[in-house]
Image (spheres, rainbow, N blue to C red):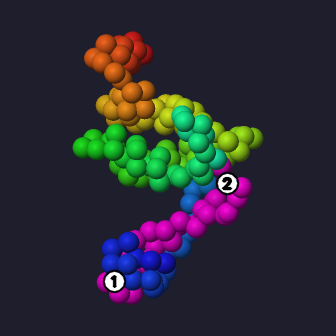
Amino acid sequence: MKCPFCGFEESKVIDSRPTDEGERIRRRRECIGCQKRFTTYEVIESLPLVVVKKDKSREVFDRNKLMNSMLRACEKRTVSIHDLEKVTDEIESALLNSLDREVTTAHIGELAMEKLKGLDEVAYVRFASVYRQFRDINTFMDELEKLIRK
């Protein structure tokens, strides 16, 4: 396993345990080169989930892209990485458990907004502003008014 800090290609496993759902194994590793610790997850390989983008192109689902987009929305907010990983796991599980092997970016975005709304309303609005591509202040205010009414 390549170290994310120094790039050294050898590490040792310090701790190994299943995640809550038992679908992944969480491994705590220590780099042999720089002695820094990092976490990896081992997942059973399955049929790929294909994402259909707005331009109709297709690519394999990448949970890191989802996690990073929500992480940007939660920047400087009180949302923990643990909560974001849990939400990302829930969204990924929902997508994999559906019978469809292809899913649109619109569907993924809606799931992410629904989860973010429960975590942090400011992060939700930030995510929605990029996802829904608010073009002016009126569309932004419409979304805020919907949030206030609920």
Residue under pointer 1: 35
Q: Which residue: 36% across, 23% down?
A: 134
**Where's residue 76, x and y in %?**
24, 43
Residue 41 belongs to the span the image colors magenta = yes
Residue 38 in the figure: left or right of residue 96: left
Q: Which one is in front, 150 or 110?
A: 110
Q: Which residue: 47% across, 46% down?
A: 66
Q: What element carries label 2?
A: loop
Q: Is residue 63 visible?
A: yes
Identify the mark nearer the N-term, 2 or 1.
Answer: 1
Q: Residue furthest left?
A: 76
Relative to residue 52, is residue 40 depicted above or below?
below
Stretch in magenta: 22-49
Q: What element carries label 1?
A: loop
Residue under pointer 2: 48
Q: Which one is in front, 138 or 112?
A: 138
- Please, what is the three-letter code of the amino acid marked with disc 2? Pro
